[in-house]
Image (cartoon, grey):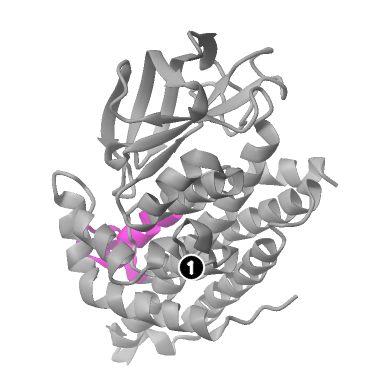
Amino acid sequence: MNLSLTEEQVLMRDTLRSFLADRYAFDTHRAILESESGWSANCWRALANELGVLGASLPETLGGSGGNAIDNLVILESMGRSLMVEPYLSTVVIGGGLLSRLGGALAEALVPKIVSGEVVIAFAWAEPQGRYELSDLRTTAVRSDGGYLLCGHKAVVVGAPWATHFVVTARTSGGERDAEGVSAFLVERDTAGTSLQSYPTVDGGRAAELRFDQVRVPAHHLLGEEGQALPMLERVMDEAIVAVCAEGLGVMRRMLDETVEYAQQRLQFGKAIASFQVLQHRMVDMHIAIEQATSLVTVATLKLDEPPRERAQAASAAKVQTGRALRLVGQSAVQIHGGMGVTEELAVGHFFKRASVIQHQFGSVDHHLRRYAERL
C-alpha cells in the first residue's frame, strides 16, 4: 500500500493550512461560533471558489478534480487543526460521494453545485431509539401519486441549520430493524411538511431535530433501489467514520502542539514544566497515541474500496484507536494546562470539546469494538 501523498495533495494540504491559519485563526473561530448563523458562508464560498477544495475528491465528469479518499483525509485533518465547523464531511464526503457513486440526472444537477458551494447537504440518519444502527428506523416512506410520503423524526442532524438538502433514511417495507426495506431519499430543505428545531452542540457546531409530516418526495429523489439502500449506506457510513477520524487526527495534533508550547512557557520552581520528566513522558504518550491512530486511519482510508467485511473492519479499527487516542490526548492536554485547560479563552478547551464529540460521532469505541468482532 502506498502511504505517501502526491505532489498535488501536498500542495493542497499546504495551501489549505495557510488559508486557515490566515482566515480561520482561533479568535475568528470563536467569533463564527458566537454569530447568529454559527458558520461562515464566506469561508465556505472561498473553499469552493478560491481553493477548489470542495471538488477535490469528486469526479471530473461532475465538475470535481477527480481525487479520492486520501484527498478527504488530507482536507479533514487540516480542518481539524483549525476546528473548522463548516459541513465538509456531510456535504462532500457523504452527499457528494453518494450522488457521484449513483450517477444519473440528480448527480449531474447537484454535484457541480456542491463543488461551487451552492448546495449544502446534511445526513439525517439517526433516530432517538436507534443508537448507531442504520437499519433501526421508524421514519417511513409510503408510495403515493408516483412519489413518496415521508413521515418521521431524525435526531441530532449535524449541520442541518445550514443545509439546502437532506439525505434521509427511511423504511419502505419490513420491520423496524430489518436489513431489507431500508431506502434513502434526497429532500430539499423547503419542502412542505419539513420542520427543524435547531440548537448549538457542545463542541460549538449546530444541529437540529428534523420532523417530516407527510412530506412529498418525487420518485426521482429516491437514492438507489427502493428497500435495498442498506449496503450503500453502510459504505457511506464507513467513509464518514474514516473521515471524522481524519479530522480527529488534526484535533489531536493541535492539542499536542498547544500543550508542548504551554509546557515550555509555564514556570514552576523556577523551571519550565516541560523539563519535568513525568510531563515529558506524558507528552510522549500523547505523541505515540496520535501516531498509532494515524497508521490505522491511513490503512482504513486505503481499504475503503475493499469488500464490505474488510472495509468495515478497517473503519471500526480506526475508530476504536482514534477514540482511545482522543481521550488520552484530550485529558492529558487539559491536565497539563491545569484549570486553564477548560476555559473559553484558551484554545485547548475548545479542541477538547471537539475531541469528546468525535469519540461518539458515528459510533462510540464500545460500539465499534462489537462491530469489529462481529465481522471477524
The residue lying toward the viewer, choosing from 305 and 265, is: 305
Percent position (x, y) of residue 144? 50, 8
Residue drawn at x 37%, y 68% is: 52
| Left or right, residue 98 beside residue 113 | right
Q: Is residue 348 above or below residue 233?
A: below
Does the image show residue 335? no
Residue drawn at x 58%, y 63% is: 69
| Left or right, residue 222 beside residue 75 | right
Position of the N terminus by quadrant: bottom right
The residue lying toward the viewer, choosing from 152 and 185, is: 185
Is-magenta flag for residue 347? yes
The residue lying toward the viewer, choosing from 320 and 270, is: 320
Residue drawn at x 64%, y 68% is: 298
Does the image show residue 77? yes
The residue lying toward the viewer, choosing from 306 and 342, is: 306
Residue drawn at x 73%, y 53% is: 311
* Residue 133, picture quadrant: top right
Percent position (x, y) of residue 182? 63, 24
Percent position (x, y) of residue 241? 58, 51
Residue type at mark 1: give it.
Ser
Residue marked by disc 1: 65
Is-magenta flag for residue 191? no
Percent position (x, y) of residue 36? 14, 44
* Residue 67, picture quadrant: bottom right
Q: Is residue 178 above or below residue 7?
A: above
Q: Which residue lies furthest to the right in this view?
A: 376
Q: Is the magenta stretch mostly helix, strand or loop?
A: helix
Magenta-colored span: 337-355
Q: Is mark 1 on a helix, strand or loop?
A: loop
Q: Is residue 330 above or below residue 375?
A: below
